[in-house]
Image (cartoon, grey):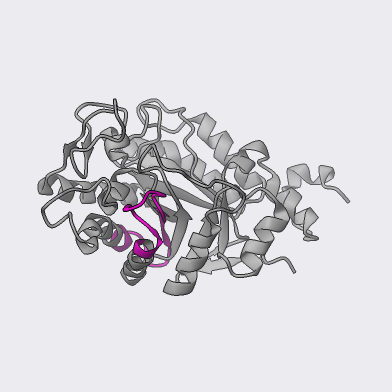
């Protein structure tokens, strides 16, 4: 029996399989509002058989968007735009999820940019202003408010974005956090804001439903964020009630030398799963059914997050099931095309 196609249960929510659609920005919004592109894009992956379909990095504030065309969830209008999308995903048997984010110094919406410290992302990038403590309190509330709107829209998983050089990752890494207050310096201080956000989101989200966190497990730069710190953070997040760590890497600085290749980030998920005892997801150049099966079946991770391969083939799960000898049900509308 394929382990990739066995259900995964987190809290009271069951995923029909271990194939999760990574959040992928579509750059297709106006004023952060989801539209028919998002319905078709995300809906197609649900029809294609994925267990979880995660909407892209969704800004908790207008200035928190990575680009002006990214999703937002800072008003009730955004909730209403997302509601039919979450409903359709669930109707197809997949779990609807959404990633909540703030881009920090990597935002591209309005000036002045804000970050953990007054350090630009790269030469020529905008100089951010360090957020003050009152603004940090307001930011936590923005995540809480967006969490409530995500629930109202019908999503069943929220993921907190602490990766790829965006705001919460900026606080975690000593390369981007040079603060001298309670939010800078030692690891416990650098992790203070991310932990506050995780605790507040977990408290606001229904106890029956899981909360994920995506991290960059390494900056791939000497003296930066690394796996050892990621393990410590994951322990703290587990104690907070986080249910799964989505293990990515990089994105904090432009000069990192990343050894990208098939499964190159999977060891991060394996180490955190083994050392912390929390569910993990592997992500990064996972493209083959046998490769995905091996990751799950040998306990390297509990699920695989897939991105570009699911852009190339929205029905990859249906095809992978056939390759692995699983008789997976096809949508009734497509049944006559199912290989026999």
Up/down of 336 relative to 243, above or below: above
> Residue 54 appears at what percent x and percent y?
50, 47
Name the residue located 37 percent from the left edge and 61 percent from the top edge: 230
Q: Is residue 79 shown to the viewer in this render? A: no
Residue 328 placement, left or right of 222: right
Work out whether 27 lies above or below 185: above
Magenta span has 212? yes
The magenta-colored residue range is 201-229
Q: Quadrant of the N terminus?
A: bottom right
Q: Is residue 328 left or right of residue 227?
A: right
| Residue nearer the viewer, 205 or 259 | 259
Residue 171 horizontal/vertical position (percent) = 25, 50
x and y, in percent, of residue 229 in the image: 34, 62
Near-viewer residue (255 or 167): 255
Quick check: 97 above or below 12? above
Q: Is residue 189 visible?
A: yes
Residue occupying the point 75% across, 49% down: 319
Residue that protrudes farthest toward the front in the picture: 222
- Please tell me whether residue 160 belongs to the stretch shown in magenta: no
**Name of the residue lying farthest toward the right:** 340
Q: Residue at x 32, y 62 (%)?
A: 202
Where is residue 76 shown, x and y percent of the image? 32, 39
Instruction: Tell me what residue is drawn at x 67 percent, y 63 percent.
Output: 294
Q: Is residue 146 above or below residue 196?
A: above
């Amino acid at each position: 029996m394929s382990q990739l196609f066995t259900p995964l249960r987190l809290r009271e929510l069951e995923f029909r399989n271990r194939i999760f659609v990574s959040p992928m920005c579509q750059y297709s919004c106006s004023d952060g509002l989801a539209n028919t592109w998002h319905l078709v894009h995300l809906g197609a992956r649900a029809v294609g058989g994925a267990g979880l379909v995660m909407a892209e990095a969704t800004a908790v504030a207008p200035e928190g968007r990575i680009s002006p065309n990214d999703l937002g969830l800072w008003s009730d209008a955004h909730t209403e735009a997302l509601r039919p999308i979450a409903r359709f995903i669930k109707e197809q048997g997949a779990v609807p999820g959404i990633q909540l984010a703030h881009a920090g110094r990597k935002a591209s919406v309005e000036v002045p940019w804000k970050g953990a410290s007054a350090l630009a992302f790269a030469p020529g990038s905008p100089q951010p202003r360090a957020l003050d403590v009152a603004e940090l309190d307001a930011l936590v509330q923005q995540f809480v408010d967006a969490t409530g709107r995500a629930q109202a829209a019908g999503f069943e998983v929220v993921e907190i974005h602490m990766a790829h050089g965006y705001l919460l990752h900026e606080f975690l890494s000593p390369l981007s956090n040079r603060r001298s207050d309670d939010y800078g310096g030692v690891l416990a201080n650098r992790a203070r804001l991310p932990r506050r956000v995780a605790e507040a989101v977990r408290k606001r989200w229904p106890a029956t439903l899981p909360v994920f966190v995506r991290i960059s497990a390494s900056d791939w730069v000497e003296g930066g964020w690394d796996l050892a710190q990621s393990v410590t953070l994951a322990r703290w997040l587990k104690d907070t009630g986080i249910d799964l760590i989505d293990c990515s890497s990089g994105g904090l600085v432009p000069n990192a030398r990343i050894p990208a290749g098939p499964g190159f980030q999977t060891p991060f998920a394996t180490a955190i799963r083994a050392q912390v005892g929390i569910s993990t997801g592997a992500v990064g150049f996972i493209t083959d059914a046998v490769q995905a099966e091996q990751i799950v079946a040998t306990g390297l991770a509990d699920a695989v997050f897939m991105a570009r391969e699911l852009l190339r083939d929205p029905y990859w799960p249906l095809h992978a099931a056939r390759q692995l000898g699983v008789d997976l049900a096809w949508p009734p509308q497509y049944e006559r095309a199912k290989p026999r």
